[in-house]
Image: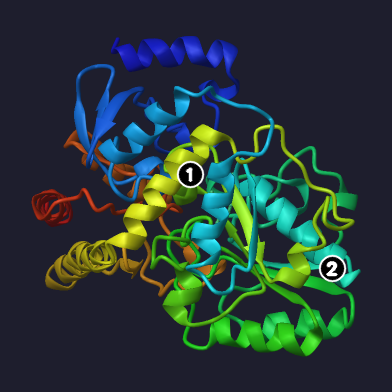
Amino acid sequence: MTRSEELFARAVKRIPGGVNSPVRAYGAIGETPRFIQGAVGSKIFDVDGNSYTDYIGSWGPMILGHNHPAIREAVIKASENGLSFGCATAKEVEMAEFICERIPHVEMIRMVNSGTEAVMSALRAARGFTGRDKIIKFAGCYHGHTDAMLVSAGSGVMTSGVPDSAGVPKGCTQDTMIAVYNDLGSVEELLEESRGRVAAVIVEPVGANMGVVPPADGFLEGLRRLCDKHGAVLIFDEVITGFRLKFDGAAGFYGVTPDLVTYGKIIGAGMPVGAYGGRKEIMEKISPAGPVYQAGTLSGNPIAMAAGLAQLQILFEDPEIYTRLYQKGEMMFEGIRRIFVENNIPYQVNSVASLGCIFFTEEKVTDYASAKTSDTDAFAAYFKYMLNHGVHLAPSQFEAMFLSDAHTEEDIEAALKLIKEYFYA
Ligand SMILES: *Cc1c(COP(=O)(O)O)cnc(C)c1O
């Protein structure tokens, strides 16, 4: 028995499924999760002394690579003053200013502790602002685990084979309407059907929780136009894309301006941070400035702010990082495409900048229905091969590969070589 196996055997007795978040379980691919001891740069080490090149990056936050010295230093320094005060601190102001001064569509911002909370609060703000109840989301987009958003929610929910969660009362999802990703007609239909009652349209501007599904040309622009026409708030859930595609996220990358944006993952550099922000007239509705209640004992925590701000400063001050990430994405995903073309492998490779994935299907993947045509058993076999050869991928067909600035050309070449061997054999 490996140490990971031993720990997992103990974990399942005391933690449901042995993990504190379902995506960490390897159930879908019939493996035991590797328990992690530490990580540095592009490498991650398990408790059995194995080392892997990591393409999960804590699901996105580690865009600069693991255990970045400047971020670690910022955390150590901040912790010397105490871990939490439950009072206002200078770092929170610096964080808010740093973001608002660099991202024009974020006029005001509120810190929370996770992406889930960010989305939940942004939806409440949109409802409070418009005085309307209905929300439109897209099948296959994940927006955290609040009741109202656990409908056709992608990745974790998808892989476990449970379309919707148990324990969610009908009342909580009755105002959630589901549109088809990349299908503006489906959105227009819902907006017409519920004319004057839709508070918000929420979207992952790049779908990244049903595998990677880029927005079709004109899709995001179309959402902007439809929201304007119907007086609905357009929310970009940038929990994955924010500070990743560019500093100003998918909004900047595609040149489409949302009314509200949600952040998570990168914004905390590995600490539990989320945030939502946007137009001042909406954000001013938030308590105590306005009537929309939202609070958090640990929100804006000084250690978390120190970590997040240190990472954002590095990302903003060295724009070459985004150029490099883009090039690494091209190298990896174009590399896989080339291998597939050369060997007549009919599978799909979708990518945007440093995010991408292989879909084990012959069908072009543009939405949830096409993503679901993937052969998950074929994915599982591929995953196992990669894991056993030192490449740490997300254990699900419906997750992205996350590249970081710490991945080297050698890392990517090694991964491509393995992929070639696997598909050629
Ligand atoms: C991860 C994720 C969330 C939820 O964030 P948590 O910090 O896990 O609560 C919400 N939206 C998107 C797009 C995500 O990828």
Left or right, residue 328 beside residue 393: left
Displayed quadrant of residue 374: bottom left
Numbered label tally? 2
Q: x%, y% of residue 189?
A: 77, 84
Please rate how many residues cluster around mark 2, counting C-alpha atoms within 10 Å: few if below 14, some from 14 to 19, many from 20.
Answer: many
**377 shown above or below 48:** below
- Determine which of the numbered discs, if any, sits on residue 268 in the image: 1
Could you tell me if the residues under marks 1 and 2 are in contact, i.e. CB atoms within 8 Å?
no
Please rate how many residues cluster around mark 1, counting C-alpha atoms within 10 Å: few if below 14, some from 14 to 19, many from 20.
Answer: many
**421 shown above or below 306:** below
| Helix, strand or loop status at disc 1 | helix
Along the viewing direction, whichever of 142 and 88 lies nearer the viewer: 88
Left or right, residue 34 beside residue 217: left
- Determine which of the numbered discs, if any, sits on residue 129 in the image: 2
Q: x%, y% of residue 415?
A: 16, 50
Mark sitting earlier along the chain (1/2): 2
Left or right, residue 419 beside residue 298: left
